[in-house]
Image: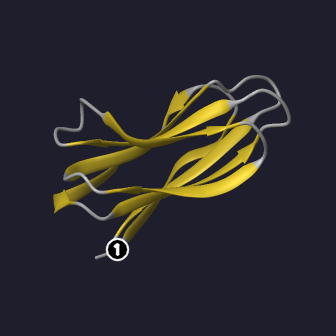
Amino acid sequence: MSQVLLSLNAVTSDADGDVLAFNSPKTVYSMQYIATIPSGSATVYLEASLDGVNFFSVQNAVLGANAIGSLLGGHPAMFIRARVAGLASGRTMTAFVAVV
């Protein structure tokens, strides 16, 4: 069953996103991000975990301007989330995570 979660909702500072949990391990999952970054840069991460406590970065994107994009995961995971670092005044990040 497919699932989609709004993990980061127009956050304006560094944040760990809400977590999407699965009943069994998944290897096909993704994240779509929407960034408003008028100056400077920020990094968005797609993170995964098997225990829901210890997350690791599957992929990341360093963004230096307004951007819309996606990241794809491939490691076995029971939990996924978005995380953003480097946000400052005037910058926002929204990210959806999904599994098929």
**Crowd around label 1: few <14 · some 14–19 · many ≥20 (10 Å):** few
Q: Nearer the viewer, residue 74 or 81?
A: 74
Residue 99 picture quarter? bottom left
Who's the residue at 66% across and 42% down the image? 93
Q: Is residue 6 above or below residue 86?
A: below
Q: Position of residue 41 (x, y in %)?
A: 71, 30
For residue 97, side relative to residue 65 (left or right) = left
For residue 94, side relative to residue 56 (left or right) = right
Q: What residue is pinned by disc 1?
A: 2
Q: Is residue 20 above or below residue 29?
A: above
Total numbered badges shown on the rendered structure: 1
For residue 10, side relative to residue 53 (left or right) = right
Residue 49 picture quarter? top left
Residue 63 picture quarter? top right
Q: Is residue 43 above or below residue 66?
A: above
Who's the residue at 72% across and 51% down the image? 67
Q: Is residue 70 above or below residue 83?
A: below
Do we see residue 19 in this rendering?
no
- Name the element at disc 1: loop
Q: Position of residue 24 (x, y in %)?
A: 14, 60
Who's the residue at 70% across and 31% down the image? 12
Q: Quadrant of the N terminus?
A: bottom left
Do we see residue 9 in this rendering?
yes
Q: Quadrant of the C terminus?
A: bottom left
Q: Which amino acid type is shown beneath numbered disc 1?
A: Ser
Q: Nearer the viewer, residue 17 or 77?
A: 77
Who's the residue at 16% across and 58% down the image? 25
Q: Position of residue 47 (x, y in %)?
A: 37, 41
Q: Position of residue 96 (x, y in %)?
A: 52, 56
- Colouring rule applied to residues: secondary structure
